[in-house]
Image: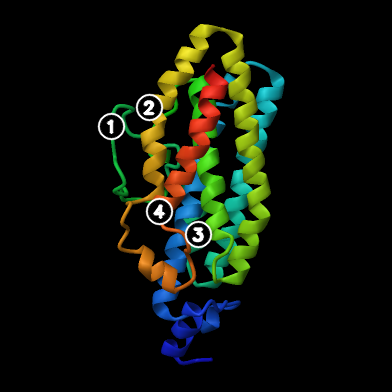
């Protein structure tokens, strides 16, 4: 199958691709964009969270944080290898890049990406302490699981397989965050107030990671088999999970 129109028709009917050789130019561009956003977000998220490891109040908390950082770098490396198969310049990830750079905490970037890398905007904001870090991990952890469930059914089989392998680990990251947040909330009321303030800060910023409600890209990605559920549906699923989880934690 070498005709581009034929391949696009095949994808619209639910077909799958397994090699860069058959990928049409528009498909390649969108797939690379999708992978770059994931890789940059995993690296930037891990780099920011790494700076919080020693803020953990107990050894077990520091071990959990270290595990999350290690595995996020590993996830980025796995997807980066596929980007290399598509001809992406992967050397930029092995040179110095300000992955820990953050904007002012009171700045609101919305959904418009900053230049420099493809990380989600939520990873441009600074973390303010351990409780804040764990709160972000919970909110973004739930979002990541929902987003990966969507990507794991993508039409490029090698990438979809990696996302299916990554999904249980990211699910565990979210669970570790929930366990840590419950422990913090149980210790004293003041910390529950800190968590509530962090939720108020991060919730809108994490919500923006789902993209525009009526995304002009969704129809194209859906035709390519790279997306299936619209942003609005994914965001609603995330809000539903948080609406059940957070009151239970904060009491």
Nearest to viewer (mark 1 / mark 2): 2
Which residue is labeled 4 in the image?
A: 231
Q: Do the residues labelled 1 and 4 touch (CB within 8 Å)?
A: no
Percent coordinates x, y for residue 155 in the rendering: 54, 71
> What percent of the width, then of the height, locates residue 168?
68, 48
Visual colour scheme? rainbow
Image position, residue 27 (x, y; %): 43, 74
Residue shown at 66%/24% (left/top)? 61
Are discs 4 and 2 less than 8 Å apart at CB?
Answer: no
- Residue identified by numbered label 1: 107
Nearest to viewer (mark 3 / mark 1) = 1
Q: Considering the numbered disc 1 on the image, is that residue within a helix, a strand or a loop? A: loop
Disc number for residue 201: 2
Q: What element carries label 2?
A: helix
Where residue 245 appears, as percent x and y from the top left, is: 55, 30
Q: Disc 1 to disc 4, how far (Cα)?
A: 24 Å
Disc 4 versus disc 2: distance between alpha carbons?
21 Å
Quarter the C terminus occupies: top right
């Amino acid at each position: 199958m070498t005709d581009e129109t034929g391949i696009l028709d095949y994808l619209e009917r639910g077909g799958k691709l397994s090699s860069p050789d058959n990928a049409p130019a528009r498909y390649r561009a969108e797939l690379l964009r999708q992978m770059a956003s994931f890789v940059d977000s995993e690296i930037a998220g891990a780099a920011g969270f790494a700076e919080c490891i020693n803020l953990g109040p107990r050894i077990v908390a520091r071990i959990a944080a270290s595990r999350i950082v290690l595995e996020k770098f590993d996830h980025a490396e796995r997807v980066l290898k596929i980007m290399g198969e598509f001809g992406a310049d992967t050397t930029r990830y092995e040179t110095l890049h300000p992955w820990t750079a953050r904007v002012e905490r009171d700045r609101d970037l919305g959904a418009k990406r900053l230049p420099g890398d493809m990380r989600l905007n939520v990873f441009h904001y600074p973390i303010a302490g351990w409780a804040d870090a764990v709160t972000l991990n919970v909110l973004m952890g739930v979002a990541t699981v929902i987003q990966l469930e969507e990507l794991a059914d993508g039409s490029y089989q090698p990438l979809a397989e990696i996302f299916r392998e990554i999904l249980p680990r990211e699910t565990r990251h979210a669970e570790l965050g929930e366990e840590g947040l419950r422990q913090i909330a149980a210790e004293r009321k003041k910390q529950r107030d800190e968590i509530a303030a962090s939720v108020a800060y991060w919730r809108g910023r994490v919500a923006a990671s789902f993209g525009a409600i009526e995304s002009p890209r969704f129809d194209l990605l859906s035709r390519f088999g790279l997306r299936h559920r619209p942003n609005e549906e994914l965001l609603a699923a995330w809000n539903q999970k948080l609406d059940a989880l957070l009151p239970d934690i904060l009491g």
